Amino acid sequence: MDSIIKIIGIVFVAIGIVYLLKPEIAKALMDFFKQANRIYIAAVIRLALAVVFLLAARECIVP
């Protein structure tokens, strides 16, 4: 589980760097999710990430 969280963190950092270097990508992504019911795709992704983080938090030994 620890390696999954590290991979997700690396992906988040990479996405942040891409957004800093090319902000038009963020705009294109927002335009993508504005169409039809695609916002539900984002909701499912956020829910899945929340479940992964909650499961990993149970294994955390730091209070």
Image (tube, helix red, strand yellow):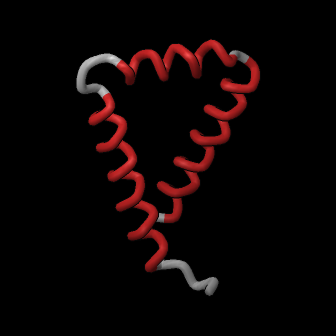
Image quadrant in which the C terminus is located:
bottom right
The image quadrant of residue 53 is bottom left
Q: Position of residue 46 (x, y in %)?
A: 39, 47
Depth check, front residue: 59 or 46 = 46
Depth check, front residue: 29 or 51 = 29
Numbered circles on residues, count: 0
Depth check, front residue: 18 or 26 = 26
Is residue 36 found left or right of 34 in the rendered image? left
Rendered position, 12 above or below 61: above
Is residue 57 found left or right of 38 in the rendered image? right
Residue at 32% in and 17% down: 35
Rendered position, 26 above or below 4: above
Residue at 29% in and 26% down: 38
Residue at 45% in and 69% down: 56
Q: Which residue lies furthest to the left in this view?
A: 37
Residue at 51% in and 14% down: 28
Q: Position of residue 34 (x, y in %)?
A: 38, 21
Image quadrant in which the N terminus is located:
bottom left
Is residue 48 found left or right of 60 in the rendered image? left
Q: Where is residue 19 in the image (x, y as percent from the top left)?
A: 67, 25
The image quadrant of residue 25 is top right
Q: Where is residue 31 in the image (x, y as percent from the top left)?
A: 45, 16
